[in-house]
Amino acid sequence: MKSCLTNNYFKTIAICFVTLFFLLSISCGVYAGLITTDAQDDIVSHELVFTGEAGFDLSIGLGELANYIISAFLGLLAIIFIILIIIGGYGWMMAGGDEGKVTAAKERIRQAIIGLIITVSAYAITYFVFNALPWGG
C-alpha cells in the first residue's frame, strides 16, 4: 500500500510555501510604497500619517474608492495568473517526457495566459473608464 506522504506531496507543499512567501513579499512591498517620504519625515504627527500625506485621504469619493478596490482586485488576479503560469512551466519541466503531464501543463499555461489577457484588458478598460468619468478620480 502506497503512503500518502510521497515525493509529490512534499513538492506540492514546497510550491505552496514559495507561493505564499512570494505573495507576502509583494504585499509588504506594496504597503511600503504607500507611505511617502514626506510622511516618513513628519511621522511625529499622527493626524498627518493617517491623512493625505500617507495616501489615506478619508475624503475620497465613491468613484475613487471603487477604482481602488477594482484595481487591487484585478492586480491580485494578475498575480495569481502569473503564479499559475509558473506552476504550469514547473509541471512541464518535471513531466519527464510523459505526454499526459506535458499536455496538462500546456493546457494550464494556455488557460493562465488567457486569464491574464482578460485581466489586463479589464484593468485597461477600468483605468480608461474611471479616468474618463468626472466622478471617477
Image (cartoon, rainbow, N blue to C red):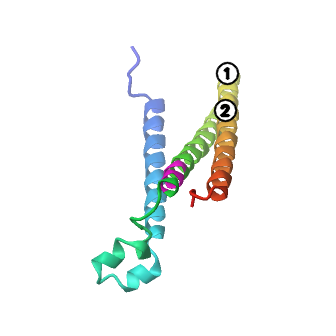
Q: Nearer the viewer, residue 93 or 61?
A: 61
Dot 1 or dot 2: first in sequence order is: 1
Query: Which residue type does callout 1 highlight?
Result: Gly
Asked if residue 17 lies in the magenta stretch, the reply is: no
- Assign a secondary structure to mark 1: helix
User: What residue did someone put label 1 on?
Assistant: 100
Q: Nearer the viewer, residue 53 or 64?
A: 64
Q: Residue at x 67, y 40 (%)?
A: 118
Residue shown at 43%/54% (left/top)? 24
Nearest the viewer among 9 and 22 is 22
Quadrant location, the N terminus: top left
Q: Quadrant of the C terminus?
A: bottom right
* Marks 1/2: CA–CA distance: 16 Å
Q: Are marks 1 and 2 in contact (CB under 8 Å)?
A: no
Say if the magenta span includes residue 69: yes
Can you give x and y, in whole percent of width and height, for residue 99 in the image?
71, 23
130 shown above or below 53: above
Q: Nearer the viewer, residue 109 or 78?
A: 78
Would you place residue 76 above or below residue 25 in this image? above
Residue range in magenta is 65-70
Residue at position x 43%, y 36% from top?
A: 10
Type of amino acid at the residue the image marks with label 2: Gln
Which residue corresponds to the image point at 47% horizontal and 58% vertical from the top-left?
Answer: 61
Q: Is residue 125 left or right of residue 27?
A: right
Q: Which residue is mark 2?
A: 111
| Residue 36 in picture, x, y percent from top left | 46, 76
- Tell me the element at label 2: helix
Residue 62 in the image: state x and y as whole percent: 47, 54
